[in-house]
C-alpha cells in the first residue's frame, strides 16, 4: 500500500470534451488500466466547415528552387553567428517562397454526417477513392476500368442506402407528418421555404426572357387575357338562347 503510485496519466486540453474517466480493476495484476471516453459532437446535416490549406495548383519545383537560390537573404543565414537566428531567417525565406508559389486558401468542406451513410457505404466510397489514387499514380487501362467499376458500385450503394433510409423513415413517421417532412427536408427534398423554386427565366414565343420586370409583364398579360382567350375559342352559338330565340320560345 505504501509503495503504490500512479504511473499512467491522461492529459486533455479540452476537459469539457471528456465524458467519463476512471480505472479498470481487472484483478489480473496490480497494474490497473485507466481509461476515458470522449464526447462526440453532433454535426448538423448538410452543414459545412471551412479549413485553411495551401493551394499547390501553380506550384512548380523548379520555380521554388530558383527562388530559394536567388534569394539575397540567404547571406544572412550563412553569416549568422547564432543558430537560432539563422534558423529563424531560413524559416522566413521558406515561408515567403511558399506564400508566393503556394498561397493559403480557404476551402469549404461538406460534413459527411448523413444518417443514411452507414459503414458499408463508407467502405465502398473508400474503395472508390483508393481506386482513383491508383489511377492517378499509374494511368493504365486496368486502373481506369477499376475506377469506373468502383464509381458505379459507389453510386448504386448510395442510391440504395438513401432509398432504404427514406422507406424506413416514411414507415416510422407515417402518423407524424411534421417529423416526416423534416426528414425529407434534411435529405434535400424541396419545401416552401426553398428559394430555388423562384422562376429565373421565361420562354415566350421562342424567346428567352431573364429580365424580372419583363417577366412580370408577360405573366400579367398571360393571366389577364385567359378569360377573353377562352371566350374567343368557344364554338359559335346556334342562336337558340339569344334574345330573339328566347322571345320566340315564350
Image (spheres, rainbow, N blue to C red):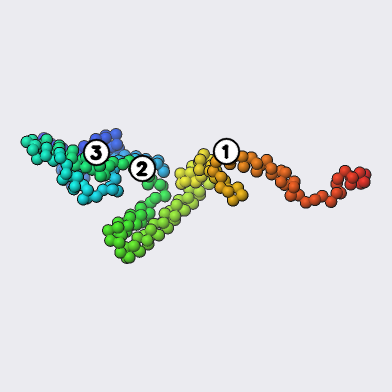
**Label 1: which secondary element:** helix
Frontmost of labels 3 and 2 is 2
Taking depth in this image into account, of 160 and 243 the one nearest to the observer is: 243
- Residue at numbered disc 2: 108
Residue at the disc numbered 3: 22
Using the image, tell me which numbered label, if any, was put on residue 213: 1
- Please state which of the two labelled residues, at mark 1 or mark 3, is closer to the viewer: 1
Most extreme residue toward the left, as rendered? Answer: 81
Q: Nearer the viewer, residue 219 or 139?
A: 219
Q: Is residue 206 left or right of residue 195?
A: right
- Marks 2 and 1, Cα distance to the nearest angstrom? 35 Å
Q: Is residue 123 visible?
A: no
Residue 28, position as x, y percentages in the image: 18, 47
Residue 230 marker: none
The answer to whether residue 185 of the structure is visible from this angle is yes
- What is the count of numbered marks? 3
> Which of disc 2 and disc 3 is earlier in sequence?
3
Question: What residue sits 29% from the left and 45% below the top?
Answer: 55
Q: Position of residue 139 (x, y in %)?
A: 30, 61
Amino acid at each position: 500500500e505504501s509503495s503504490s503510485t500512479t504511473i499512467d496519466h491522461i492529459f486533455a486540453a479540452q476537459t469539457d470534451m471528456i465524458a467519463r474517466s476512471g480505472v479498470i480493476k481487472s484483478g489480473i495484476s496490480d497494474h490497473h488500466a485507466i481509461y476515458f471516453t470522449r464526447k462526440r459532437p453532433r454535426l448538423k446535416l448538410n452543414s459545412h466547415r471551412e479549413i485553411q490549406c495551401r493551394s499547390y495548383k501553380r506550384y512548380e519545383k523548379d520555380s521554388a528552387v530558383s527562388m530559394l537560390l536567388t534569394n539575397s537573404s540567404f547571406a544572412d543565414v550563412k553569416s549568422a553567428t547564432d543558430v537560432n537566428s539563422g534558423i529563424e531567417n531560413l524559416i522566413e525565406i521558406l515561408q515567403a517562397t511558399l506564400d508566393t508559389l503556394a498561397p493559403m486558401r480557404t476551402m469549404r468542406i461538406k460534413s459527411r454526417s448523413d444518417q443514411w451513410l452507414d459503414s458499408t457505404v463508407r467502405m465502398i466510397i473508400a474503395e472508390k477513392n483508393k481506386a482513383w489514387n491508383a489511377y492517378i499514380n499509374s494511368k493504365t487501362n486496368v486502373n481506369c476500368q477499376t475506377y469506373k467499376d468502383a464509381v458505379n458500385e459507389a453510386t448504386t450503394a448510395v442510391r440504395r442506402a438513401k432509398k432504404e433510409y427514406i422507406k424506413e423513415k416514411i414507415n416510422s413517421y407515417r402518423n407524424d407528418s411534421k417529423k416526416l417532412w423534416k426528414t425529407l427536408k434534411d435529405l434535400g427534398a424541396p419545401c416552401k421555404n426553398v428559394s430555388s423554386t423562384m422562376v429565373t427565366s421565361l420562354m415566350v414565343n421562342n424567346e428567352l426572357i431573364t429580365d424580372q420586370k419583363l417577366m412580370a409583364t408577360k405573366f400579367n398579360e398571360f393571366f389577364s387575357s385567359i378569360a377573353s382567350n377562352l371566350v374567343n375559342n368557344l364554338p359559335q352559338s346556334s342562336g337558340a338562347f339569344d334574345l330573339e330565340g328566347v322571345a320566340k320560345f315564350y
